[in-house]
Image (cartoon, rainbow, N blue to C red):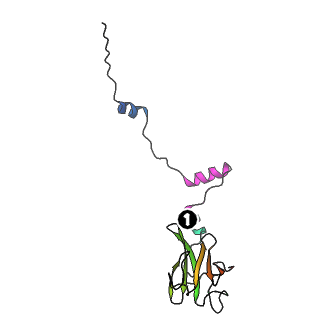
Amino acid sequence: MLLLTACQSSPDPQAIASKAIPPLRPAKIDPAATASTATTAGLTPLPSPQQVITAQPVGRPDPFLPVQGVATGGAGGQPGLPPGFRFNGVIRTGGQAQALVQFGSESGSLRPGDVGGRSTNLLPPGWAVGGIDVARGRLILRASGQAIAVSLDGRG
């Protein structure tokens, strides 16, 4: 029987890595040189963060004004809607569409299938929610066998 064994000491891997790879040092970038280099290379320089922020208007001039085109019922409102009814918007929460409305002195949200006088006080008795289209900002109400579409953009 022949038995051969070899012993060799191996160097520490961290010692090899620290000698082979020099440590990284952050580079200093001159913004003026970068802009002139980009322009001469045929590239358009990116706007500064401050230029981006000032170019985007935020909010509305008066956030307390009503949303334009919101349908309301009664005198001056969309014909066929109950008097005192106001459609303010739509949301999707928990995977379910809801319409934000006001009826008289009460406000809240309606869901498809809600029936006035039974499951909600946000509609008069005999009125029901036929559907809500969040993408188009529409609420479909049903009363006396008729469907009435109410839209945020005022088109119905």
Of residues 99 and 121, the one nearer the viewer is: 121
Q: Residue tagged by mark 1?
A: 50
Residue farthest along the front direction in this orientation: 145
Q: Which residues are magenta?
A: 29-51
> In the picture, residue 1 is in which quadrant?
top left
Query: How many residues crowd mark 1 within 10 Å: few (<14), some (14–19), many (20+)?
Result: few
Of residues 137 and 31, the one nearer the viewer is: 137
Find residue 140 and report its horizontal and vertical position in percent: 62, 77
Find residue 54 and report its horizontal and vertical position in percent: 58, 69
Of residues 113 and 29, the one nearer the viewer is: 113
Find residue 57 and report its horizontal and vertical position in percent: 59, 72
Q: Residue at x 42, y 32 (%)?
A: 20
Q: Residue at x 52, y 86 (%)?
A: 117
> In the picture, residue 149 is in which quadrant?
bottom right
Of residues 46 and 72, the one nearer the viewer is: 72
Q: Secondary structure at mark 1?
A: helix
Quarter of the figure that contains the C terminus: bottom right
Residue 61 in view here: no
Q: Residue 33 in magenta?
A: yes
Residue 53 in view here: yes
Find residue 97 and report its horizontal and vertical position in percent: 55, 71
Vertical position of residue 29 compared to residue 4: above or below: below
Vertical position of residue 133 compared to residue 62: above or below: above
Vertical position of residue 97 compared to residue 127: above or below: above
Q: Residue 20 in magenta?
A: no
Vertical position of residue 12 compared to residue 98: above or below: above
Which three-letter amino acid code belongs to the residue tagged 1? Answer: Gln
